[in-house]
C-alpha cells in the first residue's frame, strides 16, 4: 500500500490541560509534546504517542469550539494545497456502565438533534461526532475528514473494574461499551477505538487515511478536469442557464425517450380559468390577423389553442386523430409545461402566436372551413391551397404549438460555438429545431398517441418544425421559387404528378409555418412592435451571456443595444427586407389571399424607416463624419442609393470582391428565391431592396465592377465578424454607406445551406450614433472547398430627404394612415427608450426559473 502521505489530526478530550499542537518526535526530536502538561493522564499521553505514528501532527483540545475551528482551518489549508492530506477528527466519547440504561453514553441528548452553529460549541462526545459527520455529509467537494471515536469508560468505572477484573460488572461493562460503539458508528464515526489506544488498531487508521486520500485525489482530478474543459467554453458554469444548456436539455430528453415510464407530469390537469365573456372574445379574435397573444393569460392561450385545434379536428377526414376535449386540454397543458417560462420570447405565448398565425392563414386561403365569419367573404380556395388536405392542416397546427418547445432563449450559433451537448448530439445541424422536434415527439407519444404513431403525420410534423430553422431559410426561398415557376407553368395542381403534389405539399407546409414563425413582423404595428421589443430583450440576454462567457457574438445583428432605436429600426428593416418580405411575397404570389400580410410588413417597415430617419436626424449634429466634405464620387454614390440602386459585392472565390450596382427594374419575375436559384456564377441575381413597394425585382444590370480586397470570410464554424476593413472596401469605391440605412446580406449559392448560420452585425462595431447598417453573413462550416459569398447592400434611402423612398413608394397611404404612423412612431420612440430602464430589472431576474404563471403578460 502506498504511503497515505501527510496526515493531520484534531483530538478533543476534556483531560487536555493546554490546547496545543503536538508533533511526531521523529520530526522534532527535541520537543516533548507533553513537556508543558505534566498533569495530563498517562493514558492520554500513551494514546497520543501511538497516534503520532500515523499522524504527523495532532491538535489537542478540550473545547468543541477550538476543535471545530481547527478542523475547518485544516480543511481550508488542504483545499488550497496541491496534495490531499487526510484529517482525523478524534473525539473522546465517555461511557458509564453505572448509568441507567439509555444514558450510558455522554451526552444524554439525542444525537439526531441538529445543533445550530452557535450551540455547536457546547457539543461533545457522540453529539460532536454527529455534528462533524453531518457536515461532512453535505460537503460537496472531496471529503478529507475522518471522524473517529475514542471510547473511554468513566473514571469511576475504570477504578471498579481494575480492582476486580472478573466481577459481574465486567460483562455489563463490555455490553455498555458495545452499545456505545454502535452509537458512535450511527453518529457517523468511521472507526471506533478503545482508550487507551491499542498499537495494533493504529494500523487500521493508516488504511482509513489512505482510502480517504485516494478518493479525494480522484474526486479532485475529476473536478479539475471538468473545470478545465468547461473553462474553455463555459464561464459561470454553475448558474442555471448553463446547467440547463449543458445537461438538462439532453439528459431530460434522453430520459423521456428511453425511460418514458419514469417521466413525471410537470403540470396538473385542471379546468381552465377563463370566463365566458373572455371565451366569446377569444372566439371572435381567433381567425383575425390582428390577434394579439400579448393580451391573453396563459389559460386563455390554452383555451384559444383548444378552440383552433378543435375547429381543425371538426372536419370528418381527420376523425382518426381526434382527441376529446379533456385529452386536448391535457395535451396543451403538457405542451405549455414544456416551454420555459424563463425565456422571454420563445415561450408558450410565441407558440400560440404561431399557431394562430397558421390558423388564420389556413382560413384565409380556404384550406380550413370558415370560423366565426373568417374569412368574412367566402374565398375560392387558391388552387395551390387545394394541395393541403384537412390532415395537413391539422399536422401544421400541431407542429405550430410544439415547434419551439424547451427553447433555451439562445440561438443555434450560440450552442454550436459553445459545443453545447445539444449541438454535439445533433452535429451542429438545426440543433434547436431537431431538439424541439424530438422533445415534442415525446409529448405527442404520451398525450396524442394517434398523431405520434401515424408515420405520415410524424413526417410532416418533423419537416415542418425543421423548416423553422432560419439557417435553411434561403433553401426554402429557392424551393419556393421552383414552386412558383411550376405553378406559373401550370396552375392546375391536380395535373401534377403524385410525387410533385406530395413534395410541394410538404414544401407549402414548410413555407406556411415559416411565415407564421416570423409573422410577428407582419402583425398590425402595435402588436408587431411589442413582439420586436420582447425578442430584443431575449437577444439582449443572450448578449449578456456572451459577454459573460467572453465569446464573440452569435447574434444576428450583434447584441442589441436596448434603447438604441436607430439600431433596432435598422435591424428590423434588414430582417424584413432580407427575410420576411421575400418569403411573404412569394407565398402571397401562390396564395393571393395572404397579400394583406405583405402590405402589413411594408407598412411596418415604413414605420421603422421613419423611426430610423428621425433618429438619424436627431443624432446628425453629433455625427462628425456627416460634416466631412463629400467628394463628387461619394455624392454620386449617395444619389444612386437614393434612387434605390442596389450594389452587390460578389466574392467570386478568386479572392476578388466585385461591386456591382443594380438598377431597380420592372420584371416581376425576380425575387430573392430567383437570385438563389441562379446556378450560373456570372449571371447576376437580383436582390430585394429596401423601400420597394412592389414585391418583384428586376433582372440585374451590371453597371460596374471594381476589384477590392477579399472579404475576410473564413470557413470556420464560428461567427465571422465584419470589421471596418470590409466597410472601407466600400469607401474605396467611393461609397459612403455610413450615412444610409443599408442591409448587407451574404448568400452562398453554390452549396445547400442546411449547415449554415447567418449572422447580422453592424458595420461599426461600436454602434452608437455612427451606426448605420447591419450586415448579414452566412458562415459556412461545410467541407466543400469552393464557395462564394455574395454581399448585397440595399439602400433604404437617405435620411436627409425627410421622407424615405419607402414612403415615396407608398402613394396609397392615406393622410390618416400617415398620421397614425406618426403616432406609432412617437410611441415606439418612447417604448424603445424605455427598454434601457428595464435592463437592470432584467439583470436581477436573469434566468431565474419561475413556475408558470397564470397571467404572465
Ligand atoms: P424561431 O426561433 O422562432 O423558431 O425562429 C424565428 C427566428 O427568426 C427567431 O429566433 C429570430 O432569429 C428570427 N426573427 C423572428 N422575428 C424577428 C424579428 O422581428 N427581428 C429579427 N431580427 N429576427 C427575427
Ligand atoms: Mn418560433
Image: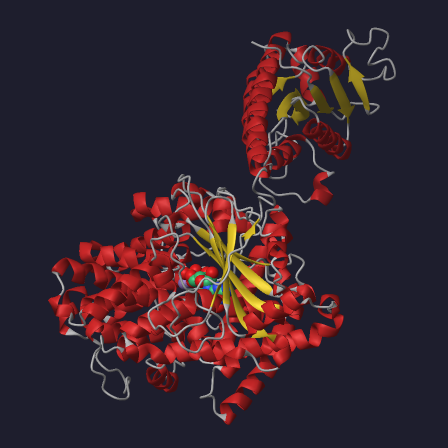
Question: In the figure, is residue 322 to the left or right of 353?
Answer: left
Quarter of the rendered image showing ligand 2:
bottom left
Picture coordinates of residue 655, whole percent (x, y) = 51, 44
- Residue 273 in sight here: no
Question: In the figure, is residue 594 to the left or right of 406?
Answer: left
Question: In the figure, is residue 267 to the left or right of 831?
Answer: left
In the displayed structure, 629 sits above or below 36; it is: below
The part of the image, by quadrant, that contains residue 332 is: bottom left
Q: Considering depth in this image, is 469 or 604 the residue closer to the camera?
A: 604
The part of the image, by quadrant, that contains residue 10 is: top right
Q: Considering depth in this image, is 633 or 375 the residue closer to the camera?
A: 633
Q: Considering depth in this image, is 476 or 421 the residue closer to the camera?
A: 476
In the displayed structure, 132 sits above or below 257; it is: above
Picture coordinates of residue 429, whole percent (x, y) = 39, 47
- Residue 137 in sight here: yes
Picture coordinates of residue 787, whole percent (x, y) = 43, 45
Extreme residue in the right direction: 36
Q: Considering depth in this image, is 388 or 664 the residue closer to the camera?
A: 664
Number of dots carrying numbers: 0
Amino acid at each position: 500500500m502506498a504511503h497515505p502521505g501527510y496526515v493531520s489530526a484534531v483530538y478533543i478530550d476534556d483531560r487536555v490541560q493546554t490546547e496545543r499542537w503536538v508533533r511526531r518526535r521523529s520530526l522534532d526530536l527535541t520537543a516533548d509534546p507533553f513537556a508543558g502538561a505534566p498533569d495530563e493522564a498517562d493514558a492520554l499521553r500513551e494514546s497520543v504517542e501511538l497516534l503520532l505514528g500515523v499522524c504527523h501532527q495532532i491538535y489537542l483540545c478540550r473545547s468543541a469550539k477550538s476543535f471545530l475551528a481547527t478542523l475547518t482551518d485544516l480543511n481550508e489549508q488542504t483545499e488550497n494545497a496541491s496534495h490531499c492530506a487526510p484529517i482525523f477528527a478524534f473525539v473522546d466519547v465517555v461511557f458509564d456502565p453505572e448509568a441507567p440504561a439509555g444514558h450510558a453514553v455522554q451526552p444524554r441528548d439525542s444525537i439526531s438533534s441538529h445543533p445550530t452553529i452557535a450551540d455547536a460549541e457546547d457539543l461533545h462526545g457522540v453529539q460532536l461526532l454527529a455534528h462533524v459527520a453531518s457536515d461532512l455529509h453535505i460537503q460537496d467537494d472531496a471529503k478529507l475528514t475522518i471522524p473517529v471515536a475514542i471510547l473511554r469508560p468513566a473514571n469511576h468505572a475504570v477504578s471498579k473494574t481494575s480492582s476486580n477484573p472478573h466481577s459481574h460488572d465486567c460483562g455489563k461493562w463490555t455490553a455498555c461499551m458495545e452499545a456505545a460503539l454502535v452509537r458512535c458508528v450511527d453518529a457517523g464515526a468511521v472507526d471506533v477505538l478503545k482508550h487507551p489506544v491499542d498499537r495494533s488498531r493504529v494500523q487500521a487508521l493508516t488504511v482509513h487515511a489512505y482510502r480517504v486520500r485516494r478518493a479525494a485525489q480522484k474526486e479532485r482530478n475529476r473536478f479539475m478536469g471538468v473545470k478545465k474543459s468547461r473553462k474553455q467554453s463555459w464561464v459561470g458554469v454553475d448558474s442555471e442557464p448553463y446547467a440547463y444548456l449543458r445537461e438538462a436539455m439532453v439528459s431530460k430528453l434522453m430520459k423521456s425517450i428511453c425511460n418514458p415510464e419514469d417521466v413525471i407530469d410537470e403540470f396538473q390537469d385542471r379546468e381552465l380559468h377563463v370566463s365566458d365573456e373572455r371565451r366569446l372574445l377569444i372566439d371572435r379574435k381567433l381567425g383575425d390577423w390582428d390577434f394579439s397573444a400579448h393580451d391573453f393569460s396563459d389559460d386563455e392561450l390554452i383555451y384559444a389553442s383548444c378552440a383552433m385545434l378543435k375547429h381543425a379536428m371538426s372536419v370528418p377526414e381527420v376523425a382518426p386523430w381526434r382527441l376529446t376535449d379533456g385529452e386536448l386540454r391535457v395535451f396543451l397543458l403538457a405542451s405549455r409545461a414544456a416551454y420555459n417560462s424563463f425565456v422571454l420570447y420563445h415561450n408558450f405565448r410565441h407558440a400560440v402566436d404561431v399557431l394562430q398565425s397558421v390558423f388564420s392563414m389556413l382560413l384565409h386561403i380556404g384550406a380550413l372551413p370558415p370560423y366565426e365569419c373568417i374569412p368574412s367573404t367566402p374565398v375560392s380556395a387558391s388552387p395551390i391551397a387545394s394541395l393541403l388536405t384537412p390532415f395537413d392542416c391539422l399536422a401544421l397546427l400541431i407542429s405550430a404549438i410544439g415547434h419551439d418547445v424547451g427553447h433555451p432563449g439562445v440561438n443555434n450559433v450560440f450552442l454550436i460555438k459553445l459545443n453545447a451537448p445539444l449541438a454535439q448530439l445533433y452535429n451542429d445541424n438545426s440543433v434547436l429545431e431537431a431538439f424541439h422536434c424530438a422533445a415534442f415527439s415525446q409529448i405527442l407519444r404520451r398525450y396524442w398517441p394517434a398523431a405520434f404513431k401515424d408515420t405520415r403525420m410524424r413526417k410532416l410534423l418533423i419537416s415542418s418544425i425543421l423548416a423553422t430553422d432560419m439557417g435553411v431559410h434561403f433553401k426554402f426561398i429557392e424551393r419556393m421559387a421552383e414552386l412558383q415557376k411550376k405553378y406559373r407553368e401550370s396552375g392546375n395542381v391536380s395535373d401534377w404528378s403524385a410525387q410533385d403534389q406530395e413534395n410541394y405539399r410538404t414544401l407549402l407546409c414548410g413555407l406556411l409555418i415559416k411565415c407564421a414563425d416570423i409573422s410577428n413582423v407582419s402583425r398590425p404595428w402595435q402588436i408587431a412592435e411589442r413582439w420586436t421589443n420582447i425578442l430584443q430583450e431575449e437577444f439582449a440576454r443572450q448578449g449578456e451571456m456572451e459577454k459573460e462567457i467572453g465569446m464573440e457574438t452569435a447574434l444576428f445583428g450583434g447584441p442589441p443595444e436596448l434603447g438604441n432605436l436607430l439600431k433596432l429600426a435598422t435591424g428590423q428593416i434588414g430582417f424584413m427586407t432580407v427575410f420576411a418580405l421575400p418569403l411573404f411575397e412569394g407565398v402571397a404570389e401562390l396564395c393571393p389571399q395572404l397579400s394583406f400580410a405583405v402590405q402589413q410588413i411594408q407598412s411596418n417597415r415604413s414605420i421603422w424607416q421613419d423611426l430610423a430617419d428621425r433618429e438619424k436626424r436627431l443624432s446628425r449634429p453629433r455625427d462628425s463624419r456627416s460634416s466631412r466634405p463629400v467628394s463628387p464620387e461619394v455624392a454620386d454614390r449617395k444619389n444612386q442609393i437614393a434612387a434605390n440602386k442596389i450594389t452587390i459585392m460578389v466574392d467570386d472565390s478568386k479572392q476578388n470582391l466585385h461591386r456591382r450596382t443594380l438598377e431597380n427594374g420592372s420584371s416581376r419575375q425576380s425575387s430573392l428565391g430567383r437570385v438563389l436559384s441562379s446556378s450560373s456564377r456570372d449571371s447576376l441575381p437580383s436582390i430585394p431592396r429596401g423601400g420597394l413597394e412592389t414585391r418583384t425585382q428586376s433582372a440585374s444590370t451590371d453597371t460596374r465592377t471594381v476589384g477590392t480586397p477579399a472579404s475576410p470570410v473564413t470557413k470556420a464554424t464560428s461567427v465571422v465578424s465584419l470589421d471596418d476593413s470590409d466597410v472601407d472596401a466600400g469607401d474605396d469605391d467611393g461609397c459612403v454607406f455610413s450615412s444610409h440605412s443599408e442591409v448587407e446580406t451574404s448568400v452562398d449559392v453554390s452549396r445547400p445551406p442546411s449547415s449554415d448560420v447567418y449572422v447580422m452585425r453592424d458595420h461599426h462595431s461600436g454602434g452608437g450614433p455612427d451606426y448605420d447598417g447591419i450586415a448579414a453573413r452566412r458562415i459556412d462550416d461545410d467541407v466543400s472547398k469552393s464557395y462564394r459569398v455574395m454581399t448585397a447592400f440595399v439602400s433604404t434611402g437617405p435620411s436627409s430627404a425627410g421622407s424615405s423612398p419607402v414612403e415615396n413608394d407608398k402613394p396609397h397611404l392615406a393622410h390618416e394612415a400617415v398620421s397614425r404612423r406618426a403616432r406609432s412612431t412617437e410611441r415606439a420612440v418612447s417604448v424603445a427608450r424605455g427598454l434601457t430602464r428595464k435592463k437592470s430589472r432584467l439583470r436581477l431576474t436573469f434566468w431565474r426559473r419561475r413556475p408558470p404563471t397564470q397571467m404572465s403578460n
